[in-house]
């Protein structure tokens, strides 16, 4: 069944003409507020539109993230793009097709059932009528509210959705084209901004003469408050200037971050807003076994291979901004607010960037460029961040501490389960909590007032509490959430938010309970899963990996398992990892079974699942943002290693065919289960569980040495 | 400012520029070849990889004047007369991309590998591409694409 209740994007943009226009012969413009961030969404949304309108894919002109044309759909995040954006386009296109056919039936005085559409042309009993979308467009009023009631196609009749369509944006990209970084209009003025090392830092001294000397070419220096920008027609000059300034600048005041920030002890010491959510019925205590374990994850950074870039131009009272933001309409609104403009004076044009895996510096670069454009009317300003600034100034995915406690019943099943989480918020994107959240905005004089921080609400999937509630049959569940809202770090969203750490903790803990019960980890999980749908995913992963064949593995090599349903409402993923563990972890092979309901673009889905596996492995094996001297201590890829070609094993993915279930968000589903499966494989190989991440060589050695 | 001479993508070019600038800046800003990308500026990610006299080399921190007179190939030089090279075609066939930002550099290193070794093993492809970082996780697709391109080029009439 495809859900026909109006999705959020459609209630926010209820008028059909906000989505669709027949303004170009032979092509249909379909708008989307969801944007391409490397996940292939443009291709998948094009497939949905072409399917419901009965067009060829080349007849769809998908206009994405252009705020003067496209619907406003918040952020492209949380694996909502297919489930919400795609569902909206499906309903709109079905309704528009029905409006045209109803009108044609009236004109031809025939039943609608005799009419059909092929490549945008209308047929009656399979024969041409001489009419098509474009010739009839004047007769159809699209300035009306979408009802969401037009019947959508049955998945069994799909000819485009669920079939392979090569990525529409890939041909340009394998020729090195198509990125905002590559825009170079005539007369462009390049700019770089000196980043504050910590929140509220005051620039006590900057030797401007030394900066100008380092630039080796004329540059302009703009200083307002704690904001410093270097501009020049020569990008190399401002790169040199910014690099010199980073070393020369002397900062004081503000809130430098202590070196131990992110450790469980530090987290548990911070001031908290706490709440408890209890479900189920407490059974009388029977003096049964109690199991407890404490887990933690460090701060991480999103780290795209390309640094943030934006262009902006202020001309005739209008600001045009080219940005790889994940939320073009939100960016427009908050640029306007921060720059004291009306939203209608700002147009954001989404332009492709390097992959976005969460709240990165794209919006910050857009603000830098926009602010400077208004100081240089008529000039196009181009800002591209340095790699060092990416580490220093990017939003940070927050550290978390997670304690688990289970009281086991006589059958060694959890009768009473508690998860307790300490975490700063996972979302400080533009507009969240009513704050602009642009890095440079707070450095300027008279910044917008800062509202108190909250986390992503549970009804939007939660931040720290995302996937905190284990998917298993638990008769009584207690969630204690300590939100740490006063941590002076711009903590924000990275792929999965709190989900992957919670899944790591829960799935490691379940393995521990299985071991206490003397049961196989997968068999134990199945005994706690009554719902057939997740059972099938778990069983499929066991089958494709030959888990129950109990293969003989060499000394030091072991397999681990991890499972979750992302946000407990999106796609299911079960992962088996085989790893060799000596002082370091060597991934040997990975298997993943996933159920995302109806899959729009099968190859794109597999690509996302595999990317999530590799990122999830990288998170738990390597990554950690550290602090020293009040600021982020990582400044190069040497200090912040991620997985590389030589670390990647063969990966087998089985997508469970489930076309009659709604399409479920998939992009983040495999991240958590992969990390957990690695943790469990390491535990089995070492005979010891490592509960604090990352699983670095130092930590493995320390674990082996302890006792 | 000085006049530098290079052979870029097979064409002789002269450019009046600051020879101490990184080669990457000369390619992107002076020669408007913007397919080679900036990633880190410290030779750690491979986004800026070009061929210098046929060998993969980072362009982000190498002074342009140190390679004056040499032959440089960028991603723009991989396609011939606007047609994709067999290597690029293999990347399309395998859909070896997500965001695509790292691909220009990866394609450059892969082209050098295949020129020297048309039938690389998985381990050889990995060794050649290990200087490159990819954050989206397309590694396995890239490895398959490079091996298939090698096979396709070996089978093509010479």
Image: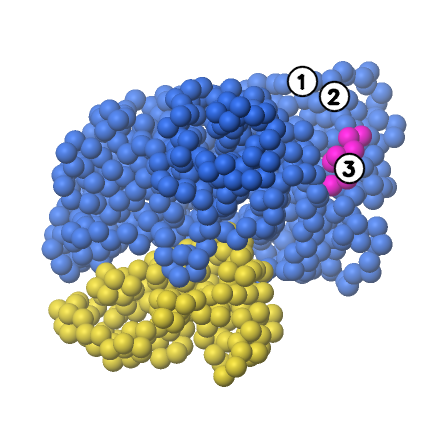
Chain colours: A blue, B yellow
Q: Residue at label 3?
A: A535
**Dot 2 or dot 3, earlier in sequence:** 2
Q: Residue at label 2?
A: A476
Residue A103 visible in the shown view: yes
Chief SS of the magenta region? helix
Comparing B103 with A428, the one in front is B103
Q: Looking at the picture, how far across and down is residue A563, in whole percent?
A: 70, 40
Q: Which region is colored magenta? A: A529-537
Chain letter belonging to callout 3: A
Q: Marks 2 and 3, Cα distance to the nearest angstrom?
A: 21 Å
State the SS at label 2.
strand
* Contact between labelled residues 2 and 1, with CB atoms less than 8 Å apart: yes
Comparing B153 with B66, the one in front is B153
- Asked if residue B71 is among those painted magenta in the image, a careful observer would answer no
Task: Tell me the residue at 70%/49% (across/down).
Answer: A654
Q: Residue at label 1?
A: A278
């Amino acid at each position: 069944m495809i859900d026909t209740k109006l999705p959020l994007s459609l209630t926010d943009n209820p008028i059909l003409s906000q989505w669709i226009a027949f303004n170009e012969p032979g092509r249909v413009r379909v708008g989307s507020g969801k944007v391409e961030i490397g996940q292939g969404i443009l291709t998948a949304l094009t497939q949905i539109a072409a399917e419901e309108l009965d067009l060829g894919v080349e007849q769809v002109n998908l206009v994405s993230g252009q705020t003067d044309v496209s619907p406003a759909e918040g952020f492209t995040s949380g694996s909502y793009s297919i489930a919400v954006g795609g569902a909206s386009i499906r309903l709109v296109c079905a309704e528009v097709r029905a409006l045209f056919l109803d009108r044609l039936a009236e004109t031809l005085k025939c039943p609608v059932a005799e009419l059909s559409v092929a490549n945008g042309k209308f047929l009656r009993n399979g024969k041409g009528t001489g009419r098509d979308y474009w010739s009839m467009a004047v007769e159809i009023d699209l300035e009306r509210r979408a009802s969401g009631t037009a019947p959508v196609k049955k998945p069994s009749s799909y000819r485009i959705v669920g079939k392979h369509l090569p990525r529409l944006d890939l041909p340009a990209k394998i020729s090195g084209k198509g990125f905002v970084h590559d825009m170079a209009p005539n007369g462009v003025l390049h700019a770089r901004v000196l980043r504050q090392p910590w929140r509220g830092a005051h620039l006590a001294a900057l030797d401007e003469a030394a900066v100008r000397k380092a630039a080796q070419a004329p540059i302009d220096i703009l200083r307002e408050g704690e904001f410093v920008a270097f501009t020049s027609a020569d990008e190399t000059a401002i790169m040199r200037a910014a690099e010199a300034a980073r070393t020369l600048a002397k900062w004081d005041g503000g809130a430098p971050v202590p070196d131990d920030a992110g450790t469980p002890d530090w987290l548990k010491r911070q001031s908290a807003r706490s709440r408890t959510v209890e479900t189920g019925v407490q059974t009388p205590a029977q003096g049964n076994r109690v199991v407890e374990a404490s887990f933690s994850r460090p701060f991480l950074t999103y780290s795209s291979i390309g640094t943030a870039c934006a262009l902006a131009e202020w001309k005739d009272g209008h600001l045009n901004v080219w940005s790889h933001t994940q939320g073009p309409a939100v960016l427009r609104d908050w640029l306007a607010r921060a720059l004291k403009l009306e939203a209608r004076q700002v147009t954001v044009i989404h332009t492709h960037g390097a992959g976005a895996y969460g709240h990165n510096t794209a919006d910050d670069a857009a603000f830098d460029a926009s602010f400077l454009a208004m100081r240089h009317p008529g000039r196009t300003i181009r800002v591209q961040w340095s790699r060092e600034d990416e580490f220093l100034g990017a939003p940070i995915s927050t550290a978390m501490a997670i304690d688990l406690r289970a009281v086991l019943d006589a059958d060694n099943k959890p009768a009473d389960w508690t998860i307790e989480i300490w975490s700063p918020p996972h979302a400080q994107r533009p507009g969240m909590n009513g704050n602009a959240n642009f890095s440079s905005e707070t450095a300027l004089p008279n910044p917008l007032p800062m509202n108190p921080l909250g986390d992503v609400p549970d009804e939007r999937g939660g931040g720290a509490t995302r996937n905190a509630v284990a998917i298993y049959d638990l008769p009584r569940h207690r969630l204690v959430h300590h939100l740490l809202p006063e941590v002076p770090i711009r903590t924000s969203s990275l792929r999965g938010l709190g989900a992957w750490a919670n899944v790591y903790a829960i799935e490691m803990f379940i393995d521990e309970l299985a071991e206490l019960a003397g049961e196989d980890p997968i068999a134990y999980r199945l005994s706690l899963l009554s719902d057939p749908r997740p059972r099938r995913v778990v069983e499929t992963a066991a089958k494709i990996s030959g888990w129950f064949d109990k293969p003989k593995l060499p000394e030091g090599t072991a397999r681990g398992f991890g499972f979750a349903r992302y946000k407990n409402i999106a796609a299911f993923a079960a992962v088996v990892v085989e790893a060799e563990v000596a002082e370091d972890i060597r991934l040997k092979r990975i298997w993943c079974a996933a159920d995302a309901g109806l899959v729009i673009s099968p190859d794109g889905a597999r690509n996302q699942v595999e990317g999530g596996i590799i990122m999830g492995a990288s998170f738990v094996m390597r990554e950690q943002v550290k602090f020293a001297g009040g600021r982020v201590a990582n400044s190069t890829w040497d200090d912040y290693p991620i997985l590389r070609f030589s670390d990647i094993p063969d990966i087998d993915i089985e997508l469970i065919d489930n076309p009659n279930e709604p399409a479920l968000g998939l992009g983040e589903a495999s991240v958590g289960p992969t990390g957990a499966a690695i943790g469990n494989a390491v535990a089995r190989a070492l005979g010891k569980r490592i509960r604090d991440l990352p699983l670095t060589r130092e930590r493995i050695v320390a674990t082996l040495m302890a006792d | 400012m000085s006049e530098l001479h290079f052979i870029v993508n097979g064409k002789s070019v002269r450019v009046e520029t600051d020879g101490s600038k990184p080669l990457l800046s000369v390619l992107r800003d002076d020669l408007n070849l913007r397919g080679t990308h900036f990633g880190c500026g410290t030779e750690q990610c491979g986004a800026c990889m070009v061929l210098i006299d046929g060998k993969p080399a980072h362009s982000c921190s190498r002074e342009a004047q140190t390679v004056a007179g040499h032959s440089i190939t960028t991603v723009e030089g991989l396609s011939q007369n606007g047609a994709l090279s067999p290597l690029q075609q293999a990347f399309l066939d395998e859909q070896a991309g997500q965001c695509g930002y790292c691909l220009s550099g990866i394609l450059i290193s892969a082209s050098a590998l295949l020129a020297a070794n048309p039938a690389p093993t998985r381990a050889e492809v990995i060794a050649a591409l290990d200087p490159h970082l990819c954050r989206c996780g397309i590694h396995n697709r890239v490895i398959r694409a490079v091996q298939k391109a090698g096979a396709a080029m070996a089978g093509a009439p010479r």
